Structures are given as structure tokens and as C-alpha cells.
Amino acid sequence: MSELSVNHLLGIKYLNKEDIQLIFETADHFKEVINRPIKKVPSLRDITIANLFFENSTRTKLSFELAEKRLSADVINFSASQSSVKKGETLIDTVNNILSMKVDMVVMRHPNPGAGVFLSKHVNASIVNAGDGAHEHPTQALLDSYSIRERLGEVEGKNVVIVGDILHSRVALSNIYALQLQGANVMVCGPKTLIPKYIDKLGVKVETNLRKALEWCDVANMLRVQNERMDISYFPSTREYTQQFGVDKALLDSLNKEITIMHPGPINRGVEITSDVADSKQAIILDQVQNGVAIRMAVIYLLASKIKQ
Amino acid sequence: MSQKVLLNATEVNIILHRLACQLIEKHNDFSNTVLVGLQPRGTFLAKRLAKILKEEYKIKDLKLGLLDITFYRDDFRRSDKPLEANTTDISFVVENKNVVFIDDVLYTGRSIRAALTAIQSFGRPEEIELLTLIDRRFSRHLPIQPNYRGRQVDAINKEKVIVQWQEQSEEDAVYLINN
């Protein structure tokens, strides 16, 4: 087994193809571990990890915490809403205070793009980006690719469309990088107002007609509309968005093939996808959640192996 | 670098049959016993013993599992080279079973300590025994000894004991290598 080429996981942009391969191979082993009667291994018993969530999260926070605990790391949790950040403390001061409690690794979600990169230059700990604003969400992209690989055998050569709010989505950008690194063809589809200008410069196809996009793809990754990041209205109404960019069973059945449906969560049932699609066999949404723990265990394990005693 | 043959193919074969017989003496029809080969190199020995037990001594329903101990080792972050994980393949529960760990070389005993922790993820065995082809005497860091041993070897720490299996290198042999 080789090593990761990086000491922090700040974004997929900083990884290479071999890193992703290594993370997937390690996750395969951890997937076997988390399906055992006793799901815990003692590998990280001398590592302390701080989960710093400056922004709300359910899935990612729980997934990281579970991954850390299953590796036997000591875990401390921090959420900005209940902290001295409210009193005006800076990010570096907050993190340095936590690090002086002998923390080895920081998993951080922050509303500002680049917060992880900034922190990695100022503190002496391994940083894992758990989402920085609308920039990157690398572990989500890794678990998405891993889930595609699990369902379809490989990622290379597959056609993947990312549907919805591309403009505000960190999942979209990380997914584009990760999928392209593995040789997949990527398309984005959504209202023109929610597709960033010049996104085609990243080498992705752009489509505004959902049916055409679905006819092209093997996998459709349906994104949530991130109302919390919108300062203006990007489409007339939720109803109209759903009519044009929502996927229901009738639309899927009308295609000449069976495509795989993904969603990073949380799902707005009846908006991006209907319940019958979310709960169908074509959807691998719960597989994504399960794979998330294995992928995060792999990332933490591989980064921890670079923290020498 | 010099190398000395400790065991040739014929000697390995004789030892394998002797070890198989010793296992039968203790475990009879293996109805409550499982063999667990330790990854990576103990699996060759475990598979070879299982083959002898099944084909030559007609043991039916012999259970063989493969256990990877990478995530249970105590040298994580101490080792210069990254630890390489292997597959664990244990399709049975070890609760109340007699477990026989099988490894090619017993050296410091740290791998066996890790295996003792790892096997607990699959239940609480009634008893655990250890079978090794080579027991490097006087090299132990932990109070661990084999129940069944093929050959005891005295080697100083800078010497390496390398076990080669037909499946990998076209011959069964054990070498003592002095760097």
C-alpha cells in the first residue's frame, strides 16, 4: 500500500488518481469491518480528532463521528452556535485553543470557501475539509464515486449528470473533479440561473433539458436546492423547478434504460425527487450513507498514518 | 548477503503432515474447531494444512478463515512503511469454538497479540491455539508460545527467516538470510 500524496484532505483538486484508488481500496477493508458483529478496530486509539462544525450538519457530522469512533480515536465535538465564536473569537484562535488540548486532526465544516486551506497554513494538525461554503466537499464526492463503482463496477467511461443547484453546491464541484479524475464523463443540468458561467471550462457538458440529460446518463446525482445560500430568487417557484428539474417514477419509466439515482441528502421529497424514486431500487441513497462511513474511516486512517509519533 | 536453507521441500512436506496429525490428535473431527490463517503469509500454510486434512485425512466440513490484523497492530504510525491491509474472510462465528491460529513464522509475538484482539470481533472463542511453521526462539517481545511448531530456529535479530511457498515461488523452502 502506498501513501496519500497529501497531509490534509482539503479538496479533490489536491488529490491524484492513485490517492483516490488508495482511499477506495482502504474503504473496501473498512466496509468489511463495519459489517462485522463488532464494528470497531483499535488503529487510532492514540489519536484525538476535533470535529469543528461552524455550519449545521446531520449526516456528515454523524458519519465522521461514527468513522472516528469505529477507528477508536478520541473525539471532541464543537458547534459554532454553542461556542465562543458567537463572542467574536477568530477561527485561528478557536482552533489553536482546541489544538492546545493535544488534538491531532481537525475535521472542519465552515461556511466560507477556502477555510480549510487557510487553516492548514496556520495550524499544526491534519485538516479534513467536511465542506467549505460552496467550494468543495471532498469526502462526499469520494463516497459518491465509491457508490457508483460499487453499483456499476467502475467509474471510468460512465456518464454522470449532476442535476440542480450547481451554483451553490460544493458537492457538484468536488464530484466534477473526482469523476473526471477517474475517467467519467460529466454533465451538469439545471436552470441556467443555477449553472455557473464558464463551468464548461472544467470540461463538463451543460444541459438545461432534464429529459435529454437523463437519456444521456448512466447515473443522475440529484442535488438539493440550497435556499440557505441564495440571496435572490433563481427560479420563479419551487413548483416550477420541480416540474422542470424534478425526477419522478413516470419520467424514469419512460426512459429506455435503467439509470442509477443518487442524492447527497438531505432530500426534499417531492422537489428534487419524488418518494417513489427515492425509495426505489434504482436509488442508492442509503448505500451512499453507509459507504460514507467506510470512506471517512479510510481517509482518517490514511491521514493519521502520516502523523508520525 | 548470505542465505542458508533451513528446510527443503521434502522437509516442509513432512512437517506439514506431522502438524496435520497433531491437529487431528487434539481436535478429532474438527466439529467444534476452526482454522484461522493470519494474513498475509499464514494463509498459505493454513490452506495447505486444510488441503491435507481434507484430502488425506478425510476431515469433512473443515472450516478455514483468513484474518487480517492490519488495523489491530500496535506499530501503526511507528513503522516507516505504510501498513498494507489484506482481506479478512471469516464466514462463520467463532463463539464457543476452538480456534487455531496459523502463521508461518512466530517472531516477536506482536502479530499474534493483534490477532487475539482481532478475533474478538467475530465472537468469544472457547479456546485459542497457535500453530507456526517456524518458531524463532529467543526473539519474543510478548509472552506468547506456539502450541504446534514445525521447526524451532535460533536466529539473531538481523537475520531473516523467509518461508517460500510453491504457490508463490514454485518451491516450498525456508531460508535463513543474513544481510
Image (cartoon, rainbow, N blue to C red):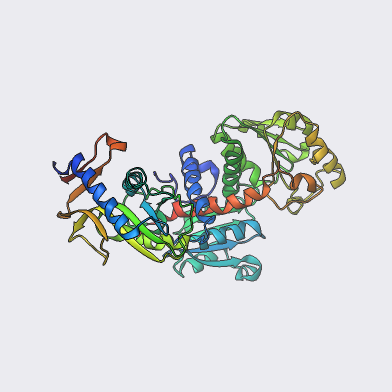
- Which corner quadrant of the image does residue A261 belong to? top right
The answer to whether any part of residue A237 appears in the image is no
- Which corner quadrant of the image does residue B5 belong to? top left
Q: Nearer the viewer, residue A8 or A119?
A: A8
Q: Nearer the viewer, residue B90 or A18?
A: B90
Which percent across, then down, holds residue A105?
48, 60
Q: Is residue A174 left or right of residue A282?
A: left
Q: Residue at x 56, y 58 (%)?
A: A64
Q: Is residue A94 left or right of residue A100?
A: right
Quadrant the C terminus of chain A occupies: bottom left
Image vertical order of residue B178 relative to residue A94, above or below = above
Q: Residue at x 69, y 51 (%)?
A: A265
Which percent across, then down, holds residue A137?
60, 49
Q: Residue at x 27, y 64 (%)?
A: B144
Image vertical order of residue B42 relative to residue A204, above or below = below
Which percent across, then down, holds residue A81?
66, 67
The answer to whether any part of residue B140 appears in the image is yes
Q: Is residue B115 left or right of residue A156?
A: left
Q: Is residue B9 left or right of residue A181?
A: left
Image vertical order of residue A136 relative to residue B113, above or below = above
Which percent across, then down, holds residue A8?
48, 51
Quadrant the N terminus of chain A occupies: top left
Image vertical order of residue A43 relative to residue B167, above or below = below
Q: Nearer the viewer, residue B124 or A51?
A: B124
- Which corner quadrant of the image does residue A284 belong to? top right
The image shows a total of numbered marks equal to 0
